[in-house]
Image (cartoon, helix red, strand yellow):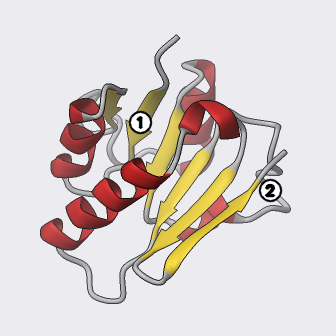
């Protein structure tokens, strides 16, 4: 079964396109017309679809509210200086290094300094 991801509205479309290039079922909050909804409502919708949430919103990586194993998975992309190119490059690095199938339900924090994974 292919891994499905939802890219949050705070990230560029290129992030979703990169996931698609790597064989993932990727869509975006914008593509579904969900921009501007509250984080809690977005979270519920994404989990109903059983998708990983790909975001730059640090709140979704809070282990107290989103414990690993209670959801499909979260990827937090962190850049010191935000740019389309930076997010695209970071996404490529992440996809070259991780097998999402083996870490379902994890919280992943990715930056150019490295990748941290909190598994269930």
Residue 89 image point, x, y percent = 23, 65
- Residue 95, position in %: x, y? 39, 48
Percent across and percent down for residue 78 are: 44, 75
Numbered badge on residue 6? 1
Earlier in the chain: of badge 1 and badge 2, it is 1
Q: Position of residue 111 (x, y in %)?
A: 45, 75
Circle 2 is placed at which residue position?
65
Of badges 1 and 2, the one in the foreground is: 1
Q: Residue furthest front?
A: 97
Q: Is residue 55 left or right of residue 28?
A: right
Quarter of the view holding residue 93: bottom left
Q: Is residue 101 left or right of residue 78?
A: right
Residue at 72% over, 38% down? 105
Residue found at x 81% / y 37%: 70
Q: Is residue 64 above or below residue 111?
A: above
User: Between marks 1 and 2, how big is the CA–CA gap?
Assistant: 19 Å
Residue 54 appears in the figure: yes
User: Image height check: is 10 above or below 25?
Assistant: below
- Residue at 38% over, 51% down: 96
In the rendered view, would you say 33 is above or below 118? above
């Amino acid at each position: 079964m292919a891994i499905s991801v939802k890219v949050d509205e705070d990230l560029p479309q290129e992030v979703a396109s990169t996931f698609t290039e790597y064989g993932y079922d990727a869509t975006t909050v914008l593509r579904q017309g969900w921009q501007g909804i509250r984080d809690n409502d977005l979270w519920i919708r994404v989990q109903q679809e059983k998708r990983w949430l790909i975001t730059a919103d640090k709140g979704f990586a809070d282990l107290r509210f989103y414990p690993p194993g209670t959801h499909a998975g979260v990827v937090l992309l962190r850049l010191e200086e935000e740019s389309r190119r930076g997010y695209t490059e970071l996404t490529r690095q992440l996809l070259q290094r991780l097998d999402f199938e083996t870490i379902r339900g994890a919280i992943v924090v990715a930056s150019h300094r490295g990748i941290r994974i909190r598994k269930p």
